[in-house]
Image: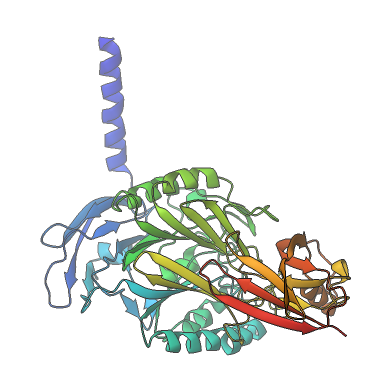
Amino acid sequence: MKHTIIFTSLLCLESIVTLAQRPGNILISGTVMDTEGKPVANVVVNDGVHFTQTDIQGKWTFVTDTCLSKFVSISTPAAYELPSENGLARFYKPIQDIRKGKDNRFVLKKRKGESDRFSYIAISDPQVLNEKDMYRWNEETVKDIRTTVDSLRKTREVVGMTLGDLVFDNMGLYTKYASSMQNLKMTVFQTIGNHDFDKRFQDLHNMRYGAPQYAEHYYNRFFGPTDYSFNIGNIHVITMKSINYVGHRQYIEALTDAQLEWLKKDLSYVPKGSAVFVNMHAAGWNRIMNTDNIRNAGSLEQVLQGYNVHFFCGHTHFYQNVQVSPSLYQHNIGAACGAWWAGGVSQCGAPNGYLVVDVDGEKVSWHFKPTGRDISCQMRLYKPHEFRRAAKYVVANVWDYDEQCKVEWYADGRKMGNMEQFTDVDEMYIRQQNAINKDEEEILTNHLFRCLPGKAKTVKVVFSNRFGQQYAETVTID
């Protein structure tokens, strides 16, 4: 036993010496100050692997491996404004700049008063491939978002979060995409998606140790680290890469073990029971068309236990709400580009658009905002014979549906009860595919509802969401 202890101790000593001798390891330090030059204590700082907090003098320090870690970022405290440059979030410093002595100081502006009321705009899959897509993104989506932000800012702060696939494998469009996100009168954060990697390489953790180039380098250049967090009001917000990229457009929807450890460390600074927003590109718990779910979503769910979580994602180009557990709700949001800018709808028939989330303390509510349409547009109705797969029925596509919602119908003003929910391919999506000469695909959605109108001349459908808000549409039957 004594020999075993000595041998183990020698191994541990050898590991420490080896770690210290790794070529990328350096000691870095810096400060977090406010705009008056006063130190800010207890700010969480990390390099993607190691975490620490600033001391009473606002100082932080740790040993980092520059072959694995490329940025130092802070988790901005709720008492301070979210740091930005022309509206783009700037919560990070390149480690090489810190190493060269260029800039190791984070400067935060204290809020005049802590506000726990704000709006959060979640945008999935801009996915611009070419100049034509970029034009539609700017002239349709960005213009619509700008109008929404102008309205919301009258009463509250607004934060934006994209959910990945900013571009469509076209690294040359990053500059124009970044410009489109500037000066929207909100602080905008980004998430990396599977089409945001340079397909010539694998992502950093898959490349050989010390490789000078890797697949995230364009994203990093414009938007910094892929895993980060910040605080606003009573919400702790986390964004993470959920794509394990192996090059040449090949990838696995998964988190690495190292990322799960990063998440555990980040949450260790957040009291249990807190409200947490988590942003990733890939969905975790889709129950219809679930082939693109994160492979190790079960492990992710375990790490998130004890928190009240809203999980925001894209990737699928269809809309699906899932109450995973009483404390975990997934918003898989229909794409800003719909079905890849082919028309005006995603694969589930939901219109191109984005999600507007209203936060009041820890109370969270939301609604989907269709691009170019009024907020009251929360469903689409089909008359009999318009929905070819349910020709006898009046059909309603209600994209923001979940199990706490109701979809009821009225025949000539008489209440008839709940519509029948069913799963099928949306008619508008079929028409869109046919218009571009693509085969009809079996992309199923379950936010479809139907009723047999009988001899009724009018059918009114009322959608009551989980917050008690009602939206109604009426069709006249010939």
| Residue 27 shows in the view | no
Residue 166, above or below 254: below
Q: Quick one: 419 or 147, which is closer to the camera?
A: 419
Rendering coords of residue 307 (x, y %): 39, 51
| Residue 358 shows in the view | yes
Residue 478, above or below 407: below
- The residue depicted at 58 percent of the width and 65 percent of the height is 314
Residue 396, above or below 424: below
Res 119 quadrant in image: bottom left
Which part of the image, by quadrant, shows the C terminus? bottom right
Q: Quick one: 342 or 195, which is closer to the camera?
A: 342
- The residue depicted at 54 percent of the width and 58 percent of the height is 330
Rendering coords of residue 85 (x, y %): 34, 80
- The residue depicted at 23 percent of the width and 73 percent of the height is 108
Question: In the image, is 385 to the left or to the right of 189?
Answer: right
Which part of the image, by quadrant, shows the N terminus? top left
